[in-house]
Each structure stands twice: as structure tokens, then as C-alpha cells.
């Protein structure tokens, strides 16, 4: 008997900063990026949005490959984190669909980025990474609120800059030359 091989994707929902709201609320920058998600987002709504994105990118093949085997194993609206389970052979397809999603899949969903933090063969390692990430954000928010600038805060800000830098510095002409 052969065991079905699966992958677990730990995904964070990262929101673009709203300068007016952040200045008014006086929130630390890492809290602005990792704000809680809407209460209307349910595991069923999330799966429906992901399946729609997979269908638009990969058509019937993608829908069939991820159809019945895609599931949400963990979802935290407070930390904007969730864990998805999918077949091992098709986790890259799921990852690319998450990359192309640009809004929370509910009515009037906010613009966001779905960032895959970790791909794991066991749910245990994905859960451990989710806990480690949440602790890191909490510590960085406390340090930023107290005014102390440490290496943890600067490392988290550098990571956020990498994930939120979506401007394209190059032009099409530069690519044609090389």
C-alpha cells in the first residue's frame, strides 16, 4: 500500500500600508503589514477563491489536479496566516496561483499579497514555523513601539521590503539587449 504524499504550505496575508490610517492610529510598521484579516474570510471562501485562480491560470488541468485534495488545515484571522494541504506533485501550481491572487477572496476584499513562507512535508513543521513567525512579529512590534531599534526589527523590515517591492525597475528594452 502506497501512502499519498502531500505538501503543507504556510501562507501569510500581507497588506499594503495605508499611510493615512497608520499615522492616525500610530501603529508600528510591522503591525500595519500583518494586520488581522476580515471576519468574512472563511476557509470555504478562501478555497473558492484559490480554486477560481487555479482555474483561470491552469484551466481544467489545474482544477482537476487540485480539485478534491486541496484543503485548509489551519486558519488564523488574527495573524492573517493559514496552512493549505495539497498533493506533492502539484504544490508549485498552488504556489503560483497564490502568487497571482491580489485580493482577499471576499466581497469588497482588501488588496493584499499572499506570501508563501514555508513548504513542508509535515503539518508539524508548518505549525512550528507559524508560531515562530508570530513571535517574531510580536517582538518586533514591541521593540518598535518602545523606540529601540534592534537587529530583529531591521531584519523584519528588510524582509517586508523584499516582499512588498513590486515595482519593476527594468524596462523591456533592457531585457531585449541582454
Image (tube, rainbow, N blue to C red):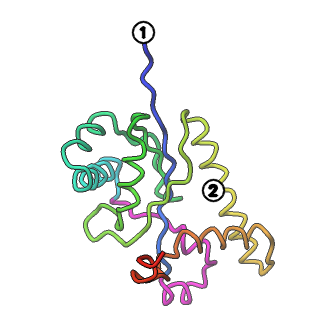
Q: Is residue 127 above or below residue 133?
A: above
Secondary structure state at the residue bearing disc 2: helix
Extreme residue toward the top, this view: 1
Q: Which residues are magenta?
A: 18-40
- Identify which residue, 12 or 86, lies in the foreground: 86
Extreme residue toward the left, this view: 60
User: What residue is drawn where x is 52% and y is 76%?
Assistant: 165
Q: Is residue 155 above or below residue 9?
A: below
Question: Nearer the viewer's eye, disc 2 or disc 1?
Answer: 1
Count the labels in the image. 2
Q: Position of residue 156 (x, y in %)?
A: 67, 68
> Looking at the image, is mark 2 or mark 1 earlier in the sequence?
1
Horizontal side, residue 162 vs residue 49: left or right? right
The residue singled out by tag 2 in the image is 134
User: What residue is drawn where x is 55% and y is 39%?
Assistant: 120
Q: Position of residue 113 (x, y in %)?
A: 44, 66
The residue singled out by tag 1 in the image is 1
Secondary structure state at the residue bearing disc 1: loop
- Find residue 83 and name its label: none
Rendered image quadrant of residue 173? bottom left
- Quadrant where the N terminus sits is top left
- Identify which residue, 11 or 143, lies in the foreground: 11
Amino acid at each position: 500500500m502506497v501512502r499519498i504524499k502531500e505538501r503543507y504550505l504556510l501562507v501569510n496575508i500581507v497588506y499594503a500600508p495605508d499611510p493615512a490610517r497608520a499615522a492616525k492610529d500610530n501603529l508600528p510598521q510591522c503591525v500595519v503589514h500583518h494586520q488581522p484579516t476580515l471576519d468574512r474570510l472563511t476557509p470555504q471562501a478562501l478555497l473558492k477563491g484559490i480554486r477560481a485562480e487555479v482555474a483561470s491560470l491552469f484551466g481544467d488541468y489545474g482544477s482537476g489536479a487540485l480539485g478534491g485534495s486541496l484543503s485548509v488545515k489551519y486558519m488564523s484571522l488574527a495573524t492573517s496566516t493559514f496552512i493549505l494541504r495539497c498533493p506533492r506533485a502539484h504544490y508549485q501550481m498552488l504556489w503560483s496561483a497564490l502568487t497571482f491572487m491580489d485580493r482577499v477572496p471576499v466581497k469588497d476584499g482588501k488588496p493584499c499579497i499572499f506570501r508563501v513562507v514555508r513548504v513542508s512535508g509535515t503539518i508539524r513543521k508548518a505549525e512550528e514555523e507559524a508560531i515562530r513567525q508570530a513571535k517574531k512579529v510580536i517582538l518586533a512590534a514591541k521593540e518598535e513601539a518602545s523606540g529601540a531599534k534592534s537587529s530583529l526589527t531591521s531584519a523584519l523590515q528588510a524582509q517586508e521590503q523584499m516582499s512588498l517591492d513590486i515595482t519593476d525597475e527594468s524596462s523591456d528594452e533592457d531585457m531585449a539587449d541582454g
